[in-house]
């Protein structure tokens, strides 16, 4: 199993960024997937997840209406579209294979998002 | 939201020590709890799932216990590779939530 996160960078408050996660080594289309973030010096925070076929999506309240999780099963890819970014969204973002009630068993290496003017 | 509280937040220990980390949930989550080890610049690693099930490949010195609202992670004999931050996570209810973390540092 391999997950490779990309797309991070620096952006001004109010800006947008799209993160990607390339999956390999497993049948991507059969798993829920999640995004988890870690702000500098802080703990882990779950951000969003998406069902195998994209029909169900869940978000932490702080990103609802601003972030959109999506996936392309044909390309074995997971995405996080982040709009209206705020300073507090500054974090390293990890994609993770989500086994629902038994947690996240595989993680990407993370991609850093910095929101600053 | 279910709040997860870990204690202690920092733990100073020596190689060979027995280490116990506690995680409490603000409401019952049955056995739907996972533990992770996280080192700086690395991906988090799942150690335990369903409160007490050891992840494949994880050394047997790691163990988890508990149910309902109170859980523990125990390292029976701390090894040099175990100095890291440990997080619990409830997998029961949205939003999924993590504890604040326990940093295990060298005494």
Image: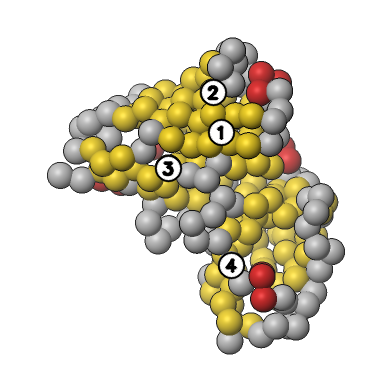
At a point 54% along the width and 29% down the height, the residue shown is A22
Q: Could you tell me which quadrant the C terminus of chain A lies in?
A: top left
Separation (CA) of disc 1 from disc 2:
12 Å
- Report which residue position mark 1 lands on: A34
Q: Secondary structure at mark 3?
A: strand
Q: Chain of mark 3?
A: A
Question: How busy is the neighbourhood of tag 3: few (under 14 within 10 Å), some, or many (20 plus)?
Answer: many
Measured from the top left, where is residue A29 in percent x and y? Answer: 66, 19
Measured from the top left, where is residue B23 in percent x and y? Answer: 65, 61
- Report which residue position mark 4 lands on: B84
At a point 43% along the width and 58% down the height, the residue shown is A42
At a point 49% along the width and 20% down the height, the residue shown is A70
- Report which residue position mark 2 lands on: A77
- In the rendered structure, the answer to whether residue B6 lies left or right of residue B17 reads left
Q: Chain of mark 2?
A: A
Separation (CA) of disc 1 from disc 4:
23 Å
Mark 1 or mark 3, which is nearer the start of the sequence? 1
Q: Share a chain, discs 3 and 4?
A: no
Circle 3 or circle 4, nearest the eye: 3
Mark 3 or mark 2, which is nearer the start of the sequence? 2
Question: How busy is the neighbourhood of tag 4: few (under 14 within 10 Å), some, or many (20 plus)?
Answer: some
Q: Secondary structure at mark 1?
A: strand
Circle 1 or circle 4, nearest the eye: 4
Separation (CA) of disc 3 from disc 1:
14 Å
Give the vertical position of A28 relative to B46 (above or below): above
Q: Which mark is residue B16?
A: none
- In the rendered structure, the answer to whether residue B101 lies left or right of residue A52 reads left
Separation (CA) of disc 2 from disc 4:
30 Å
- Report which residue position mark 3 lands on: A111
Separation (CA) of disc 2 from disc 3:
15 Å
Which of the 4 image quadrants contains residue B92?
top right
Question: How busy is the neighbourhood of tag 2: few (under 14 within 10 Å), some, or many (20 plus)?
Answer: many
């Amino acid at each position: 199993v391999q997950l490779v996160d990309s797309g991070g960078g620096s952006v001004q408050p109010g800006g947008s960024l799209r993160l990607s996660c390339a999956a390999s080594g497993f049948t991507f289309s059969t798993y829920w997937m999640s995004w988890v973030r870690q702000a500098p010096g802080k703990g882990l925070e779950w951000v969003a997840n998406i069902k195998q076929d994209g029909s169900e999506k869940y978000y932490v309240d702080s990103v609802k209406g601003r972030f959109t999780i999506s996936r392309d099963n044909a390309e074995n890819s997971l995405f996080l579209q982040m709009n209206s970014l705020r300073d507090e969204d500054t974090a390293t973002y990890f994609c993770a294979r989500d086994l629902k009630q038994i947690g996240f068993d595989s993680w990407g290496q993370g991609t850093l998002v910095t929101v600053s003017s | 939201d279910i709040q997860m509280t870990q204690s202690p937040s920092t733990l100073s220990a020596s190689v060979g020590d027995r280490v116990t980390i506690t995680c409490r949930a603000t409401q019952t989550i049955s056995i739907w709890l996972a533990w992770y080890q996280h080192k700086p610049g690395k991906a988090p690693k799942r150690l335990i799932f369903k409160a007490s099930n050891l992840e494949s490949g994880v050394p047997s010195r790691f163990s988890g216990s508990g149910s309902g609202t109170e859980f523990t992670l125990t390292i029976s004999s701390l090894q040099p590779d175990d100095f890291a931050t440990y997080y619990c996570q409830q997998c029961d209810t949205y939003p999924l939530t993590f504890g604040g973390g326990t940093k295990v540092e060298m005494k």
